[in-house]
Image (cartoon, grey):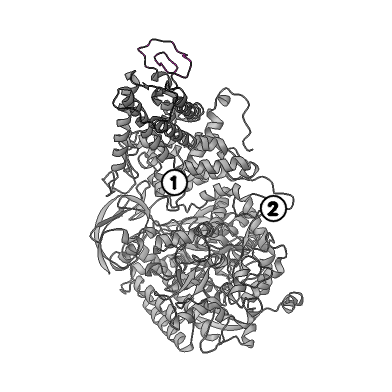
Amino acid sequence: MTDLERHAYDVVVIGAGGAGLRAAIEAHEQGARTAVVCKSLLGKAHTVMAEGGIAAAMGNVYPEDGWKVHFRDTMRGGKMLNHWRMAQLHAQEAPDRVRELEDWGALFDRTPAGLISQRDFGGHRYARLAHVGDRTGLELIRTLQQRTVALGIDVYMECTVTKVIKQQDGSIQGAFGYRRENGRFVLWQAPSVVLATGGIGKSYKVTSNSWEYTGDGHSLALQAGATLVNMEFVQFHPTGMVWPPSVRGILVTESVRGDGGILKNSNGSRFMFDYIPDYFRKETAETEEEADRWYTDKKNNRRPPELLPRDEVARAINSEVKAGRGSPHGGVFLDIASRHDADYIRKRLPSMYHQFKELAEVDITKEPMEVGPTCHYVMGGVEVDPETAAAKVPGLFAAGEVAGGMHGSNRLGGNSLSDLLVFGRRAGLAAAERARATTVPNVADAVLKEAAGEALAPFERDGGENPYTLHAELQTAMNDLVGIIRVAGEMTEALERIEALKVRAKALTVEGQRPYNPGWHLALDLPHMLRVSECIAKAALEREESRGGHTRDDFPGPREEWGALNVICSADGEDVALTRQPLPVMPPDLAEIFEES
Amino acid sequence: MTATVPAGPNAPGRATIAARTLRTDRWWLQPVTTVTVLVLFIVYSTFRAFENAHFEAGAYLSPFYSPCIATGCEETAFPVLIPGPAFISPALYILVIPLGFRLTCYYYRKAYYRSFWLSPPACAVAEPHSRYTGETRFPLLFQNLHRYFFYVGLLYPVILLYDAAHTVWARDDGGYVGLGTVILVVNALLLAMYSMSCHSCRHLIGGRLVHFSKHPIRYRLWTWVSRENSRHMKWAWISLVVVAAADFYVRLLSTGAFDDPILF
Amino acid sequence: MAYEASLRVWRGDDEGGGLEDFLVEVNEGEVVLDIIHRLQATQAPDLAVRWNCKAGKCGSCSAEINGRPRLMCLTRMGTFDEEEVITITPLRAFPVIRDLVTDVWFNYEKAQSIPPFTPRERDEDGNHRMQQVDVERSQEFRKCIECFLCQDTCHVVRDHEENKPSFAGPRFLMRIAELDMHPLDTLDRRRAAQDDFGLGMCNITKCCTEVCPEGIKITDNALIPMKERVVDRKYVPKTWLGRTIGRRKD
């Protein structure tokens, strides 16, 4: 094929967020020729949106913290549906992953002893989030970016991968895509491909996610023959902005609550006290007085209910709004102004101060914020081996949000950034190892022609469907019918709508030329979003219980038989097939940790 | 082949937009104001420096002529170091330091580069020059000597304070505090604030350190200087206007326009 | 509350282009990026624009709005009169790719050329110890979201393409200051700041600070302190006379 740029590498990493860059750094340090392919410019990945911190049981603030406590918190937060081995590796390795960031130039906030400071967050027993004000994600991405540049790793910016190429024997041969800048095709041939593409939020209308979160990694994995796990579990962050409409969904960090912010309804009552589930009753304050004392004396008081895991808080806010006790724009009030003086707020939450001032003309040091749930994170993702992050397809690896299993049914705040680092590194290591022992033959021209033809199809056909319209319809369907509270009837309707959209997507037509054409880009992203939405809706319909990020109005509460089952999605032609799979069983020495408490 | 690159934001490959700026606000207001005030000051101070008269009124000495180290001062508190010809104004010997200090000051540099040299006249407004080398060569390389003007310039607020105090006890009629005394004190204090809030001072007092925590006292001083440094522009303008006003006051007294009111 | 705004958007590529007029609906609370998206969805589906987070955190949607370098996601429509014609162009200091998207490779090239962070050894227990007061200065610079508005507005390269090879621009001179003030970094970066990255080209006219959407005091806290550090290293009489060079870190 002419009109094609060919490259050969040992490891190709798709995605330049925290997981992708960490994987690339590791692969490079293992001696692999490594490339990073990303849809945006380097340093713009969605990781920058993470605000609160990196969870790691370093024990800098509370020496009694350790990996076992972190492991326990993670499993309990995920309602025991996590892959225990991933949760264990994560808790054990996170502190080292944070420390090495300092060797690469990161500057975390400090304790008086000069160590990395750690802050409180929902669901974590001890203050353990290493942070930089409320812009930890930016610090992480910048540190990894600068390290990547210092090592001289090749980065292909503004390139979209449209297909993972496989050999006859089913193993990975490379990735195929195009440069957004000029629309030209590129082939990265490699025996190891690491998916680090992030999440799926752009299938929802109200979301904290950027345009990149189209679930393309999930979808590419499915197409390549890999499986997805836990796709029914989508995390709605309890506090997104609700006003003005154009910023609806943008994240308000959990640190606001960690630093003393409280939730109130329109009656001015601290409603979270009415929503403490039995599961967390023992460790949650019962009175406002006890909750307020906790901020200064954590040893002798229990945590305020505002710091319950995200799924609990999101559901509570949802109920308050539905009961007519919401704020004027359909959220609830998050108040830190009455709790701290203006200087403290500006110092601890500079980005939030800035964000509300710039986007909503609200001064958070003077008035409460209006917040409501927003689609934030997908716990589900590519089913991987905990040690190597390898998917079911030989040569395919997945790390970060695109991988599943680590967070079970609900992710704790702060566990995402540490997940990126721990499993990004493991993926890079295993990918490099595989590449050492594997060579791949050149990709045949016919395969490339086919991939190019698929990508160019929207220019050729004459179906008349507008990608922007289809996208908006999908977002509405997912938001309204497979949102935070679900029932069978609505999800069935969502699946019908998705089927109809799949048909219409075949008639997508784009105008203009190939260079930097956003209509074309969206037309190629839509099939990914549709496929992932189908997985979410089908898996959510299948799981007849409520657990973590999955709440069924028709099946309230968890059910024991489901506590040991994962729902697995795989591709079946153009459809999605489901299977139920038993959860891996935790060894007795780890199971003990849960009996103690 | 020699490619001629046109100045302004229209180099080859960039978006073709003819306008040198698309700004719609009154961006020219700031440079025009700066030029107006600075020109007024330069004209007045040059006139006064060369006037070689009316710089003393009783015990008062104009700040433009202080310290008076040449012949021609009657009431001077300083020794005559330069006995040179009397037609050379005593101001000329000593103004070089405050002049150099202000000329190399980081704030005034911004002000005159923008408003006099139009480099650039305002943000995102194209400058008219076809070449630009910044402060990399003679004479602008000498802007780097700002700190030496700062060192010597630090003496001036002290001298001016001494001058002001001197007016109290050096009077023939036993001493009093007049309005002029207060003006001279204020002038000295403003010059002190302008000097100590300067960027070189901020660097020397602590900015050059890497580990503040090992130098707690210098860190506290640095924090104070940093705060005032953020108001450096304000101190620069106020002290400029007040020094001219103080001189003008002495001139009014000296020409007999009115008598210095006695305060106590 | 909704009204039709008059937009003039630059459309074209490196071969040429011009301002085109559009009428686009505006609703309460919207920002310029919302309007550009509506324009894309309703009238110009192939209008090229770069954006990501739409919350002022990633620094992708840099453009010039009424001639001023701004982030489109942080420019509220409410700041304009309803009758006002709003002109939106790509960044004018960089080569254009298409419409509002420019080629910002210059910045990535400069980032690559800076000698990387070179830390001292860890303490014996495997930790690095630093005090909060020692990290705060560099932390301010690390707030940078790399929107490159400062690079775009800086007249040294905006008006003089020929200076690009010798001048790193405010963002990367600030990066050098960040590393020079970093408690763990061991390199002396002063001479390189002046000789290799063009700090002397900066005439501290503060446009970088004016356009910074993060409110970083680039000139006062990074560039001028760095100039003073360069004086310590290069221009004090002591070093001019070629005598012993002072220790870099205290």
Q: In the rendered structure, the residue with mark 2 lies on which chain?
A: C
Q: Which residue is mark 1?
A: C106
Q: Quadrant of the N terminus of chain C?
A: bottom left
Tell whether position B81 is magenta: yes
Q: Nearer the viewer, mark 2 or mark 1?
A: 2
Q: Is residue A405 left or right of residue A179?
A: right
Predominant SS of the magenta segment: loop
SS label for mark 1: helix
Q: Is residue C30 left or right of residue B66?
A: left
Residue B52 is left or right of residue A440, and the answer is left
Counting from the top left corner in percent of width and height, residue A209 is at 47, 67
Determine whether B176 is above or below B8 in the image: above
User: Would you say residue C212 is visible in this rendering?
Assistant: yes
Rendered image: mark on residue C127: 2
Q: Which mark sits nearer the N-terminus, 2 or 1?
A: 1
A315 part of magenta stretch: no
Where does residue A471 sit, x and y in percent of width and height?
Answer: 38, 73
Q: How many marks?
A: 2
Is residue C88 placed above or below B150 in the rendered structure? below
**Which quadrant of the figure has residue B262?**
top left
Is residue A26 rendered to the left or right of residue A355? right
Write down the region rendered in magenta: B68-89
CA gap, disc 2 and disc 1? 36 Å
Label 1 neighbour load within 10 Å: few <14, some 14-19, many 20+: some
